[in-house]
Amino acid sequence: VGAAGIDSGSYSDAGAAFVFFGPISSGSYLTSDAEATITGNNSDEYRASAGAILDIDNDGDNDLLIGAYSGAENGDNNIIVFSGSDF
């Protein structure tokens, strides 16, 4: 679940992704229920403005891709890839 405008510590609009492993039943969940939280490292980074789950490296494990469209360390848009084998 992406929360692009959320603050992280002293960083405003750093953004965060909250990762829930399935299967997930219908209902309401809190961010504190997430198995993992991935937050932005800079103000205005807007991490988790987009996300996808797919097997990008063809190893048989789904990988997590998270977009950060501004404020990243190098000033460019970024896609951060987390290998599914790491989960």
Image (cartoon, rainbow, N blue to C red):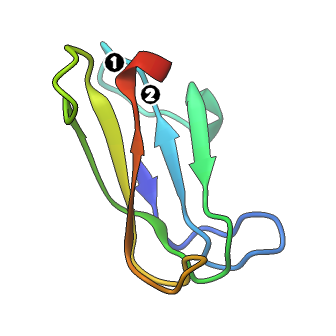
Q: Where residue 65 appears, x then y in whole percent?
A: 33, 47
The quadrant in which residue 2 appears is bottom left
Q: Are marks 2 and 1 in contact (CB under 8 Å)?
A: yes
Q: Where residue 37 appears, x then y in whole percent?
A: 60, 41
Q: Where residue 7 appears, x then y in whole percent?
A: 68, 70
Q: Residue at x 60, y 67 (%)?
A: 6
Asked if 56 appears above or below 4 in the picture, the reply is above
Q: Residues within 10 Å of mark 1 (few under 14, many from 20)?
A: few
Element type where label 2 sits in the image: loop
What amino acid is labelled 1 in the image?
Answer: Ile
Q: Residue at x 55, y 84 (%)?
A: 71
Asked if 14 appears above or below 61 in the picture, the reply is below
Q: Residues within 10 Å of mark 2 (few under 14, many from 20)?
A: some
Name the residue tied to disc 1: 24
The quadrant in which residue 34 appears is top right
Name the residue tied to disc 2: 20
Asked if 70 appears above or below 25 in the picture, the reply is below
Q: Is residue 33 left or right of residue 29?
A: right
What amino acid is labelled 2 in the image?
Answer: Phe
Q: Residue at x 43, y 33 (%)?
A: 28
Asked if 43 appears above or below 22 in the picture, the reply is below
**Quick check: can you spot residue 87?**
no
